[in-house]
Image (spheres, rainbow, N blue to C red):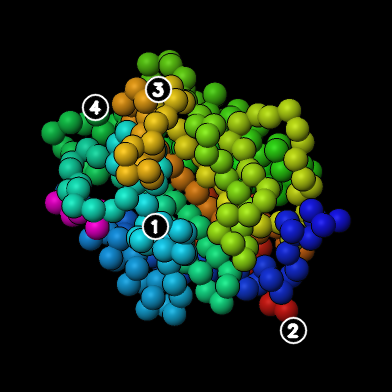
């Protein structure tokens, strides 16, 4: 019972998670619009922080001990936890942005990847866009699965199945990062339970009303082996191949599922999969 009370939220608590999710989405939208050749990752960080603070929230990444920034900005072979700085975005780069906001003690957490246009190298861009697209679509399959599966770890099986069914253009397999997974979310940005992006033997906790999780697949164009750089944060692929990262925070409630970090609740991403998200009803 103690395990359950840690994982599952009340209807009122889920409602309190809506606004930090919306603020997180707004910050990421602003950053995405600013990703062009010549911008630095530190400039992107400032944009995200301004949006979050103007909304009356605070960047929850800055609450992580030892981290001083609002976003993680990971470029090309950087998988996750890239520290914003003077790096200048170049045409053809894969840019992955991870961000979160905390409002009234409740958290949102989301990430996206995008390929910067490069008309001079269409083949390179197309290859990298496929990596980004397969990663994003595997995320939406995992989110959609929450509407029907009984146990949480079935989500990882659905994600892996989609990735296996959509290999690289050369027929090779994508690498599904195993060292970093999704997680529960609520009063803390990272809570139990873990959310795997691949098949595991255990069934995991029940998917039922009150569950709030962040699903976040990370794929590489090579192996799954990673190393952490000397800054103690930035995680890169060991073989130097490209990586992509997508994430959304999702709530399971009495009416269905709702993507907390999507402005439309996930409607556009879920519509092709036959799932309609339902807003979380306000409590009285």
Outermost residue, top direction? 171
Q: Earlier in the sequence, mark 1 or mark 2?
A: 1
Please name which of the two marks, 4 or 2, marks the residue nearer to the observer: 2
Mark 1 to mark 2: distance in Å? 38 Å
> Where is residue 56, by image quadrant?
bottom left
Gap between marks 4 and 1 measured at Cα: 37 Å
Mark closer to the observer (3, 1): 1
Using the rendered image of the protein, determine whether residue 19 is visible from the camera's viewpoint: no
Give how far across and how far down residue 278 sits, in percent: 66, 63
Q: Which residue is mark 4?
A: 123
The residues colored magenta run: 38-42
Q: Earlier in the sequence, mark 3 or mark 1?
A: 1
The image quadrant that residue 9 belongs to is bottom right
Query: Does label 4 or label 2 sit earlier along the sequence?
Result: 4
Please tell me which residue is depicted at 46% across the width and 58% down the height of the picture: 65
CB under 8 Å between discs 4 and 1: no
- The residue that disc 3 covers is 222
Q: Is residue 15 visible?
A: yes
| Count of labels in the image | 4
Question: What is the secondary structure assignment of the residue under circle 3?
Answer: loop
Residue 109's place in the image compared with 121, above or below, is below
Q: Residue 101, position in %: x, y? A: 47, 66
The residue at which mark 2 appears reads as 284
* Residue at 53%, 53% in the rendered image: 248
């Amino acid at each position: 019972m103690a395990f359950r009370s840690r994982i599952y939220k009340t209807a009122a608590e889920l409602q309190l998670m809506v606004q930090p999710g919306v603020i997180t989405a707004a910050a990421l939208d602003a950053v995405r619009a600013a990703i062009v050749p010549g911008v630095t990752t530190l400039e992107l960080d400032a944009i995200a922080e301004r949006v979050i603070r103007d909304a009356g929230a605070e960047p929850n990444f800055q609450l992580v001990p030892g981290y001083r920034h609002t976003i993680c900005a990971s470029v090309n072979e950087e998988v996750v936890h890239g520290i914003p700085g003077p790096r200048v975005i170049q045409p053809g780069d894969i840019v992955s942005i991870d961000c979160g906001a905390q409002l009234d003690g409740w958290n949102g957490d989301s990430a996206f990847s995008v390929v910067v246009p490069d008309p001079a190298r269409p083949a390179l861009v197309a290859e990298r866009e496929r990596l980004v697209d397969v990663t994003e679509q595997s995320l939406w399959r995992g989110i959609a699965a929450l509407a029907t599966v009984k146990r949480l770890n079935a989500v990882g099986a659905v994600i892996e199945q989609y990735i296996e069914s959509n290999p690289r253009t050369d027929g090779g397999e994508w690498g599904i990062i195993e060292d970093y997974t999704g997680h529960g979310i609520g009063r803390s940005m990272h809570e139990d339970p873990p959310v795997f992006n691949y098949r595991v033997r255990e069934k995991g906790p029940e998917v039922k009303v009150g569950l709030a999780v962040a699903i976040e697949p990370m794929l590489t164009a090579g192996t799954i082996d990673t190393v952490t750089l000397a800054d103690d944060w930035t995680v890169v692929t060991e073989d130097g191949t490209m990586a992509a990262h997508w994430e959304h925070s999702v709530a399971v409630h009495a009416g269905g599922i709702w993507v907390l970090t999507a402005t439309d609740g996930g409607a556009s991403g879920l519509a092709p999969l036959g799932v309609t998200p339902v807003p979380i009803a306000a409590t009285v």
